[in-house]
Image (cartoon, helix red, strand yellow):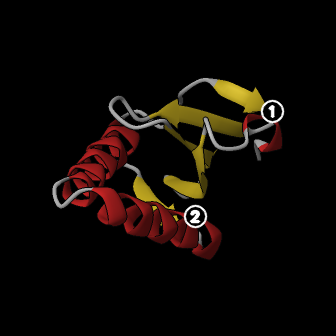
Amino acid sequence: MAYSVIISPHAQKEIENSIDFYAINSEEAPLKFIIELQQVYHLLTTNPFYRMRYKNVRAVALKKFPHYLYFITNEKEHTGRVLSCFHGRRHPNARP
């Protein structure tokens, strides 16, 4: 059964900030970022059991952008809740 992906308000704000940042420097980068996010969301619907980072928090890296999606998986409800879209190079010591 496919899992549903839920984006937390905090993660949504981080995603919007990243899109705004990429829009300053490039016309294509925001769209490429969104496309890659959608690909990762699709991966999470089929395989929500990526590497465990801390307790029940898992993480998956975007391939072309230095971001990580931190999420928790609820097996009972078949959902993956994205907690953060973290830029790994800006503040690496402040990981969620």
Is 47 on the left-hand or right-hand side of 36? right
- Residue at 83 percent of width and 34 percent of height: 55
The quadrant in which residue 88 appears is top right
Q: CA distance from mark 1 to mark 2?
A: 18 Å
Which residue is more in the foreground, 14 or 77? 14
Q: Residues within 10 Å of mark 1 (few under 14, many from 20)?
A: few
Is 27 on the left-hand or right-hand side of 22? left
Mark 1 is on which residue type?
Answer: Tyr
Is 46 on the left-hand or right-hand side of 21? left
Mark 2 is on which residue type?
Answer: Ala
Q: Residue furthest top?
A: 51
Question: Element type at marker 2?
Answer: helix
The answer to whether 47 is drawn above or below residue 80 in the figure is: above
Q: Residue furthest front?
A: 25
Instruction: Give the number of callouts.
Output: 2
Task: Residue 80 in the image: state x and y as whole percent.
Answer: 52, 52
Residue 1 visible within the image = no
Closer to the chain start, of discs 1 and 2, is: 2
- Residue at 50 percent of width and 68 percent of height: 17
Task: Residue 43 in the image: state x and y as whole percent.
Answer: 33, 38
- Residue at 45 percent of width and 71 percent of height: 16
Question: Element type at marker 1?
Answer: strand
Q: Residue furthest left?
A: 28
Task: Residue 3 in the image: state x and y as whole percent.
Answer: 40, 50
The answer to whether 41 is drawn above or below residue 6 in the figure is: above
Q: Tell me the tag on residue 11.
A: 2
Task: Residue 69 in the image: state x and y as whole percent.
Answer: 54, 45
Mark 1 and mark 2 residues within 8 Å of each other at the beta carbon: no
Q: Residues within 10 Å of mark 2 (few under 14, many from 20)?
A: many
- Residue at 43 percent of width and 58 percent of height: 5
Q: Tell me the tag on residue 54.
A: 1
Which residue is more in the foreground, 11 or 65? 65
